[in-house]
Image (cartoon, grey):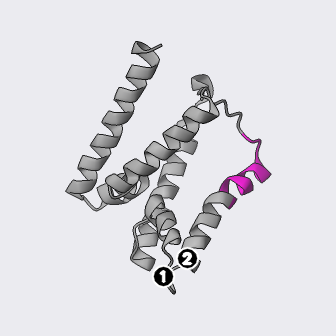
Amino acid sequence: MNIDWLSFSPVPALAGGALIGLAAALFVLLLGRVAGISGIIGALFKPQRGDIAWRIAFVAGLIASPLAYALVTQWPTIEIQASWGVTLVAGLLVGLGTRYGAGCTSGHGVCGLARLSPRSLVAVIAFMLAGFITVALLRHLLV
C-alpha cells in the first residue's frame, strides 16, 4: 500500500482515532465488553445462547461502515504490493498470533492500554516489534 504523504491531513486521522476510542469506551461502559475484534469474531465460531446477536451486529457494522463512507466520498485507491498467496499467509499468521497473544491489536492496543493492563502493554510491544522486524527484513534485507 502506498501512502500519499503530501495529501495527509492529521485532522481526519485524529477524528477517526477519537471515534474509535469513544466507541471502545461506550462498548465497555454499556456492555461491559472489550471491543477486541478477534475475540468478538472468534466467539461466533463457538456460539452461546444470548451472545450471538450483538456480535453479528458488531461485525455487520464493521462491514457497513466503509460502505456508508463510500456513499459520501470517493473510495480511496488501495494498492497492495503482495500476491494473494502472501496476503493469505499473512492473514493466517495474524489470526494465529491473536490466539497465542490472547487478543488482537484492537483488544490490547485500544482497550487494554486504556485500562493500563500490563499484559496488553507487553502484547502491543510484541506486535510492534514483530511488525518493525518484518518490514526491516522484507523491505531492506531480503529484497
Residue 25 placed where, x, y %?
42, 66
- Front-lying residue, 1 or 10: 1
Residue tagged 2: 54
Residue at the image position 45 percent from the left and 45 percent from the top:
94
- Front-lying residue, 38 or 99: 99
Prevailing SS of the magenta stretch: helix
Tell me the crowding category of disc 2: few under 14, some 14 to 19, or many 20 or more residues within 10 angstroms, Cα based.
few
Let me know if residue 65 is in the magenta part: yes
Q: Is residue 121 left or right of residue 136?
A: left
Residue at the image position 24 percent from the left and 58 percent from the top:
116
- What is the three-letter code of the residue carrying label 2? Trp
Residue 95 placed where, x, y %?
45, 50
* Whether residue 29 is situated above or below residue 117 in the rendered picture: below
- What is the three-letter code of the residue carrying label 1? Gln
Nearer the viewer's eye, disc 1 or disc 2? Answer: 1
Tell me the crowding category of disc 1: few under 14, some 14 to 19, or many 20 or more residues within 10 angstroms, Cα based.
few
Residue 2 placed where, x, y %?
60, 26
Residue tagged 1: 48
Tag 1 secondary structure: loop
Q: CA distance from mark 1 to mark 2?
A: 12 Å
Residue 139 placed where, x, y %?
46, 18
Residue at the image position 48 percent from the left and 60 percent from the top:
37
Residue at the image position 50 percent from the left and 39 percent from the top:
90
Let me know if residue 120 is in the magenta part: no
Which dot marks residue 70? none
In the current view of this chain or complex, which residue is farthest to the bottom?
A: 49
Q: Is residue 71 left or right of residue 37?
A: right
Residue 82's quadrant in the figure?
A: top right
Q: Mark 1 and 2 residues: CB-CB less than 8 Å, in contact?
A: no
Mark with earlier residue (1, 2): 1
Give the magenta part as a residue range.
64-75
